[in-house]
Every structure is written in C-alpha cells, then in structure tokens.
Image (tube, rainbow, N blue to C red):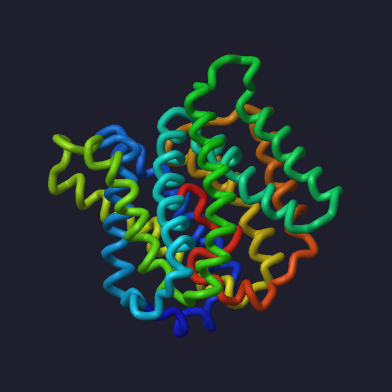
C-alpha cells in the first residue's frame, strides 16, 4: 500500500478527519454484526480481515525482527486485540459517543503526563467531569458494565500508545502493522471464535471484511499520510474532536440523541483533549511512528 502519491495533493487535516470518520462509522456499523456474533466475534472478524490485507500489501519484515523486539510486538498486538473487544463490548451497552469519550481519557492522561507539567493534569480532570455529565450516573440509566468495558478500553488505549511508540521506532510505514495486527487477530480469536461459532455465514464474513476496510485498514493508512506532514501537537489537537464526531455519527446512524447536559460534557472532553496537546512537538522518535500513530484516530481499534 503506497501513500506518497495521494498525500501531496490532499490537505493533511482532511486525511486525519477522514480517518476519524472512518473509525467512528465502522464502530456505528458494527452494532448489527455485534448482535449476530457478539463483540469478541466482531473483533475477530474485523482484525482477521485487516491482518490479511496488511500482510498482502506490506510483507512482514520477519528477518529484521530481533529478540528484543518480541515483547513490544506481542504486547502491542495483544493489547490491540483486547482493546477492540472491550470497546465493542462497551458500545453494545452504552451510546457510542459516551464510550468514545470514556476511552479518550486513556490517551488524554498519557498526553498530560508526558508534558511534565503539574497543571497539565487539570485536563484529564476536566475531561472526567465531561464524562460524568455524559454518563449522568445519578439517573441510573447507563449500564455499569458498559462503563466498565469503556474504562478497560481507556486503560488499554493508554498502553497501546506507549507500545506503539516503541514499535514505531523500530518498524516504519505499514510493516509494523503487518506484524501486530495478525497478533491482535489471534488474540481476539481466543474469545471471538467460541462467541461466533454457529453464527457464521458468507454474509457475516463479508460484513466483517467490509468493516475491516473502514477499521483498521483505511484510517491507519490515512493517519500515516497525515502524521508525516503534521506536528504531533497539531495532529493530537485535531484528534481531540473525535468524541464529538462519535456523538454526531451516533445521532445520524444509530439515532442516539444526547441531552443538552451530555452535549456540554462532550464539549468539556474536546476542550480538555485539545488543551492537553498544546505545546507538543514532533520529535525524531515520533517520526518512526507508522500508521498506528501516537494519539491516533483509532479509538476502538
């Protein structure tokens, strides 16, 4: 998969926004498949199809793998698989926008801690206030299990960012993904195969393959093109609008209508995410980050 021809002709921010829209559209469109084969089964189908595509377009650099690379590759692949299952389990139980906002707390906290400034910790707190407004726990209508899965996805996404930096420093372009996405697919198969057993058909498998194009294939490639032409500060700030996009697609595709208080909560999350990225710089280490990126668009990988 080449990315050089398209990138110079398309503004970088357009690529990043398209990647985010692809991620959230895939999440919204995954719900019917989740009803058929469950969240783990959906994750397994999506990641397996994505693995096949990445291996086909970018031959895995097996000969360049060193023993010291194995923990990072295995860690990133396993984390990616578990995060995908956790996020899909969350959106099965709570609105898409709410799940994305909660999951966003993971990378937001990582970004704040990286700033090495005490005042930066105010942004995760502000975002947490927005999440409370989104979930409205005093109403008792949100399923606690959905929140728990979203929190697990947030912790996993934070770990995913740290591991991606490590792997991205060693493998450029899509080569790292051709190694880690197959590991994620195998990880999701442990729970996904038993959950999907007895519910597979040609249409179900094709649906999983189609969703794999929306996530992970298309957004990873678009992020790769965007992040090579943007500072990490600009890229991360742009990614902060993803919870708002999730709410919009939840409304349009799933007819999940947020209240005024929940909309205010989303605004707080977006503001906190954008503020946490201020002053960030794209270092030489960041340039090794491939399609997965740091602070990626891939909420709910």
Along the line of sight, which residue is nearer the eye, 207 or 41? 41
Q: Quadrant of residue 154?
A: top right
Whether 225 is drawn above or below 293: the answer is: below
Along the line of sight, which residue is nearer the eye, 59 or 5? 59
Total numbered labels placed on residues in the image: 0
Q: Residue at x 33, y 74 (%)?
A: 60
Whether 175 is drawn above or below 86: the answer is: below
Q: Residue at x 31, y 77 (%)?
A: 59
- Give percent across and percent down for residue 11: 58, 74
Residue 37 visible somewhere in the drawing: yes
Along the line of sight, which residue is nearer the eye, 4 or 249? 4
Q: Quadrant of the N terminus?
A: bottom left
Whether 206 is drawn above or below 230: the answer is: above
- Give percent across and percent down for residue 206: 21, 52
Locate residue 98 relative to residue 48 in the image: left or right.
right
Residue 58 visible somewhere in the drawing: no
- Give percent across and percent down for residue 255: 46, 33
Seen as rendered, the residue at the extreme front is: 67
Q: Residue at x 59, y 58 (%)?
A: 162
Locate residue 210 relative to residue 160 in the image: left or right.
left
Q: Quadrant of residue 56?
A: bottom left
Q: Quadrant of residue 73?
A: bottom left
- Give percent across and percent down for residue 294: 59, 62
């Amino acid at each position: 998969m080449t990315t050089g021809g398209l990138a110079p002709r398309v503004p970088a921010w357009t690529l990043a926004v398209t990647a985010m829209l692809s991620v959230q559209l895939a999440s919204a469109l995954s719900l019917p498949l989740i009803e058929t084969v469950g969240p783990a089964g959906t994750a397994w189908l999506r990641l397996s199809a994505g693995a096949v595509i990445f291996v086909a377009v970018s031959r895995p650099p097996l000969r360049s793998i060193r023993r010291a690379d194995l923990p990072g590759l295995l860690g990133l692949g396993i984390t990616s698989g578990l995060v995908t299952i956790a996020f899909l389990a969350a959106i099965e139980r709570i609105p898409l926008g709410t799940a994305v906002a909660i999951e966003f707390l993971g990378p937001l906290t990582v970004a704040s801690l990286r700033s090495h400034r005490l005042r930066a910790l105010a942004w995760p707190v502000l975002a947490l206030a927005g999440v409370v407004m989104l979930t409205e726990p005093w109403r008792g209508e949100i399923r606690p299990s959905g929140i728990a899965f979203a929190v697990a996805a947030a912790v996993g996404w934070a770990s995913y960012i740290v591991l991606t930096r490590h792997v991205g420093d060693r493998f450029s372009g899509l080569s790292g993904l051709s190694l880690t996405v197959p590991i994620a697919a195998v990880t999701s198969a442990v729970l996904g195969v038993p959950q999907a057993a007895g519910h597979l058909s040609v249409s179900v498998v094709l649906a999983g393959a189609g969703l794999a194009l929306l996530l992970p294939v298309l957004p990873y490639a678009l992020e790769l093109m965007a992040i090579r032409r943007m500072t990490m500060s600009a890229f991360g700030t742009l990614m902060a609008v993803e919870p708002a996009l999730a709410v919009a697609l939840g409304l349009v595709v799933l007819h999940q209508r947020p209240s005024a208080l929940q909309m205010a909560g989303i605004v707080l999350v977006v503001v906190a995410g954008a503020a946490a990225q201020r002053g960030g710089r794209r270092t030489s280490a960041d340039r090794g980050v491939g399609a997965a990126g740091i602070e990626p668009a891939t909420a709910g990988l």
